[in-house]
Amino acid sequence: MKVKLSEIINAQQSLQVLSSTQFPPDTGKLAYAIARNIRKLDIEIKSFEDVRNKLFESYGEAVEEPDEKTGEVKKLKRIKKENIEQFQKEVNEILEKEIEVDIWKIKYVELQPLGLKPIILVPIAFIIEE
């Protein structure tokens, strides 16, 4: 299945909720399909995070700022002002890429016993079929 990387990244929180969901009896096939999909999508999420971190290193700078509560100086890294636009452009280009992911579609009716709210289901709509 082809899907934009941004859809996978946006589904990350919903996938975490699914991974911690208690499955009722007789839903082993569903639990396996969800676990498999999460594993496949996590590969893409990690790849994106690795590339984004490398871009962050390229466009960033080390700064020291005092912690507001403790006053302790912390070493941070942030994007240089002159690089923010280019950094965002490159990240957005990556997020718009369509990638092929071997995921299994899950029937909506199979998800109903889990009692998931729409706020969880909407971001993972690309893996749900009616």
Image (cartoon, rainbow, N blue to C red):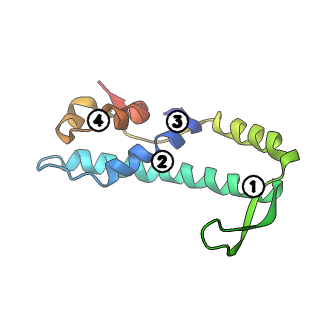
Name the residue carrying label 4.
117
Residue at 67%, 73% in the rendered image: 71
Q: Mark 4: few, some, or many residues within 10 Å (few <14, many ≥20)? A: few
- CB of mark 1 within 8 Å of CB of mark 3? no
**Residue placed most toward the observer, 83 or 10:** 83
Q: Amino acid at mark 4?
A: Lys
The mark nearer the N terminus, 4 or 2, is: 2
Q: Residue at x 21, y 30 (%)?
A: 109
Tag nearer the camera, 3 or 2? 3
Which marked residue is nearer to the observer: mark 1 or mark 2?
1
Which residue does the numbered mark 2 point to in the structure image?
Answer: 41
Residue 116's image quarter?
top left
Give the mark, 1 or 2, whose residue is nearer the N terminus: 2
Q: Tell which circle, 4 or 3, labels the residue nearer the N-terminal end.
A: 3
Q: Nearer the viewer, mark 4 or mark 2?
A: 4
For disc 3, the marked residue is: 7
Cα distance between the residues tagged 4 and 3: 18 Å
Numbered disc 4: secondary structure: loop
Point out which mark residue 56 bears. 1
> For the residue marked with disc 1, what is the amino acid?
Phe
Residue 14 at x, y percent in the picture:
39, 43
User: Distance from label 1 to label 3 (Cα)?
Assistant: 21 Å
Most extreme residue toward the left is: 25
Q: Nearer the viewer, mark 4 or mark 3?
A: 4
Please tell me how crowded label 3 is: few (under 14), some (14-19), or many (20+) other residues with Cα within 10 Å: some
Q: Secondary structure at mark 3?
A: helix
